[in-house]
Amino acid sequence: MIFSRALYRELASAAGATFTVLFSVCITWTLIAILGRAAGGRVASGDVVALIAFQSLNYLPTVLTLTSFISVLVVLTRTYRDSEMVVWFASGQSLLRWIRPVLVFGIPMVLLVAVLSLFVTPWAKMKSTEFVQRFEKREDLKRVAPGQFRESSSADRVFFVEGSANGSTVVQNVFVNSLQGASNSVVVAKEGVIEPDGKGGQFLVLKNGRRYQGVPGQADYQSMEFERYSMRVATKVPVLGTDVPLDAQSTAMLLAVKNQYTRSELLSRISSPIVCLVLVLLAIPLGFVNPRAGSSANLILALLIFFTYNNLVKMVEATVKKDKLDFALAWWPLHLVVALIVVMLFAWRLNVNHRYHPLVWLNAWKRRRMLRKSPELAGATGGTAR
């Protein structure tokens, strides 16, 4: 009990520190990426906080998996480095005794990763997609931002305003470039204002400007000045959710629709908790380190194993997506191979003199078999064959 309580406290402390570092890196990376998109006019500035929150939820399964793996590895490495494992083995304890407390710590992490991967992450991706679609399909006039060129939803007009005044309905120094078939029209004005037409539509009314139409140098080129020029703008209502990406669809929808694309995404979601469980167990035998040597090699090896394992899972997903491998034969072989590697590492790390070690069982079985075949040898050894 004392050992378990101390181990749980140390695992929780290591997990908290590891999660804080990894999650901070992810938040910083997400913040830079989304602020760059907002500065480039690809997302609304008011949606930045929500998009960061949704993107952070997408990173959580990977962050929690790596946190569990590194936490167990760091604790085991410290016990070897401080020679506590020498005392542990000298007391007749086995490395197998670490499995239960590590699983008590790891199973809640695995369940949390499963819930995030199967339910929370698809919801976060769906909400993020809705925010982006709402921004991309908004009305033409709402696309206009001071100091930036903006394209209309129909891709036939480009707006530019130098600044705004008297609220958001009045803009100054307006430039509008329109393309209608082979004809090109450029309108510049000192001021523009948005006015409704009373029928649900909107007009951009430009004042004190000039309009150019045609190709410069051609006979039909036109140039005119105006005091008031009205231009109808698109006011269509965006239809959201019509083109939801596959990774933003719910797990229930993936189960209902059976094809290689939905099966590939489903494989990605169910692999996350399995990878977390296998890596937590792998960290126990992998935590061995020579007390006289440094412990950084173990951490580097752990990161290589983590990324290699995840890349292999992605490769299997791509194979299913290309319909080269059936889902029923794709979701388990890789995890089974890694689980067998974990068993082999346990067998390698176990003390050969321990009664739980497979080599002890094998030697005992060979000895009994030899004694049964050679009764005279059994009499020479004290008759233990009987």
Image: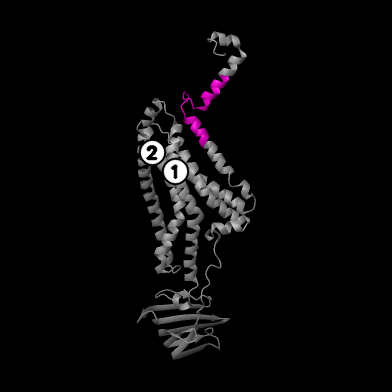
Residue 194 sits above or below residue 155 on the image: below
- Name the residue that disc number 2 marks: 75
Residue drawn 42% across the image and 67% down it: 47
Q: Classify residue 22 as left or right of residue 199.
A: left
Assign a secondary structure to mark 2: helix
- Name the residue that disc number 1 marks: 106
The colour scheme applied to this rendered structure is: one colour
Q: Classify residue 245 as left or right of residue 95.
A: right
Estimate the spatial distance between the alpha carbons at disc 2 and disc 1, rounded to whole Å: 13 Å
Q: Position of residue 363 (x, y in %)?
A: 54, 21
Occupied quadrant, residue 284: top left
Q: Position of residue 29 (x, y in %)?
A: 41, 56
Occupied quadrant, residue 164: bottom left
Q: Nearer the viewer, residue 32 or 264?
A: 264
Residue 5 sits above or below residue 181 on the image: above
The answer, for residue 304, to whether it is visible in the render is yes
Q: Position of residue 242 (x, y in %)?
A: 56, 68
What's the magenta region? 342-366
- The amino acid sitting under disc 1 is Gly
Residue drawn 44% across the image and 46% down it: 108
Q: Nearer the viewer, residue 231 or 350?
A: 350
Q: Nearer the viewer, residue 239 or 98?
A: 98
Q: Was residue 353 drawn as part of the magenta stretch in this picture?
A: yes
Quarter that holds the C terminus: top right
At label 2, counting other C-alpha atoms closer than 10 Å, the crowd grade (few under 14, some 14-19, many 20 or more) is many
The answer, for residue 35, to whether it is visible in the render is no
- The amino acid sitting under disc 2 is Val
